[in-house]
Amino acid sequence: MSCSDKIKESSPSPSSKPGFFYGYVIVLCSFLILLIVWGAQYSFGVFFKPMLNEFGTSRAILSGAYSVNLVVLAVASVFTGKLSDKYGSRIVVTVCGSLLGGSYLLMSQVQMVWQIYIVFGIIASIGVAGSWVPLISTIARWFVFRRGLMIGIAAAGVGAGTMIIPPLSGYLISNLGWRTTYIIIGMAMLVLIIISAQMLKNDPSRIGQSAMGGSQHQDDNSSSFTLREALHTAQFWLLGTSFLFMGACLYSVLVHIAPHAMDIGISPVTAATIISVIGGISIISKVASGMAVDRWGIRRVTLVVAALMLTSLIIIQLSDALWVLYVFAVIFAFGYGGFAVIQVPYLAELFGLRYLGAIFGIAYFLLNAGAFGPFVVGKIFDVTSSYSWAFIFLAIMNSLAILCVIGIKTTRHD
């Protein structure tokens, strides 16, 4: 193929028919669903101390419920990825969204710690599994041109949710209690997720459109790996292992940064704003990272975002002052936001689109296997009465992730 042919093939072609491109509706609905799902998921740290005080358990045990949530989420994502490939994202997101909203209503009624493990650790995690993998893999099918940007815009919903819902939860908990707050969030989930899910469409060709920027059919059949083929490459396992280590860092910070701030004398509401800063800055980071992926390539951007996460974990070792925590939050947010964006584009570049949902499901399983992070961090705190060694542990994990990315080479499909 000549250079001019490549330019023509990659030029934007919004639709085979004139008129509005429906892919933008997919991006908007994905943004709204990810906002409520992940904003609530990342609010667990705000509920942490009120539940800790009521149930009188250790941090490691309560953190373990979040770790179980992530493990089940990882396993369930393997199936939701395959199911969305087969039946479409609308059905998967609707069913899982109903489970998620119901689980938050049930959380308002738990009376024992083991019930938290069942309701939040298992039921809620299956609900969450019906969001990220189906939605992001669907967007990848609608966009070839500007794929990184569109995924970044949708992923910014996670940042918006993280900016809005944790401080709102902190306010509601302070005034209404943590149980009533779970009811409010659960009802909001049921309404927003189910309505938005009805607008989702998996395949552009079913409504007479084509993926923006090229022939999706050509891409699928000429370069796509099957799931089995992808799993037999070193590139998949290097990328998946980097997801594992960065996931451990991400989830550990989002669970433990608010308790850490409260331990050093910061009020619960102010501690919650640290999470909201991460969410707010990550909105900018996700859009910027998506644009950077389209312009400078996926490998280079991945290394940059991993280095930013590592830098933040070094900075937090320097001081417990509030302003240092905010500096940490800003830098970490740029790394975390970029990490959210690079996942599907990297997999699509290496393995193609045809089996992307299934391949991403396995990769996302590895990412969420980082669920060991919050538990280990909680255990380190219980042993040392400090988060210092815990943050060192996370910095080591992040360094290993960078080494894995450095080792990834471009795949070839014979």
Image (cartoon, helix red, strand yellow):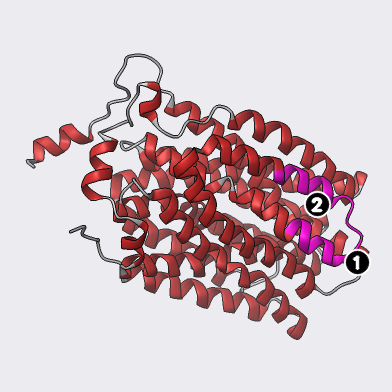
Label 2 Cα crowd, 10 Å radius (few <14 / some 14-19 / many 20+) = some
Q: Secondary structure at mark 1?
A: helix
Residue 115 magenta-drawn?
yes
Q: CA distance from mark 2 to mark 1?
A: 21 Å
Q: Which mark is residue 269?
A: 2
Quarter of the rendering occupied by the C terminus: bottom left
Q: Which residues are magenta?
A: 99-120
Quarter of the rendering occupied by the N terminus: top left
Residue 382 sits above or below residue 190 on the image: below
Mark 2: amino acid: Val
Residue 140 sits above or below residue 253 on the image: above
Residue shown at the point (74%, 68%) measured from the top left? 63
Residue shown at the point (56%, 63%) measured from the top left? 368
Label 1 Cα crowd, 10 Å radius (few <14 / some 14-19 / many 20+) = few
Residue 115: give x, y in percent of width and height.
83, 62
Residue shown at the point (72%, 74%) measured from the top left? 378
Residue 171 appearing in the image? no
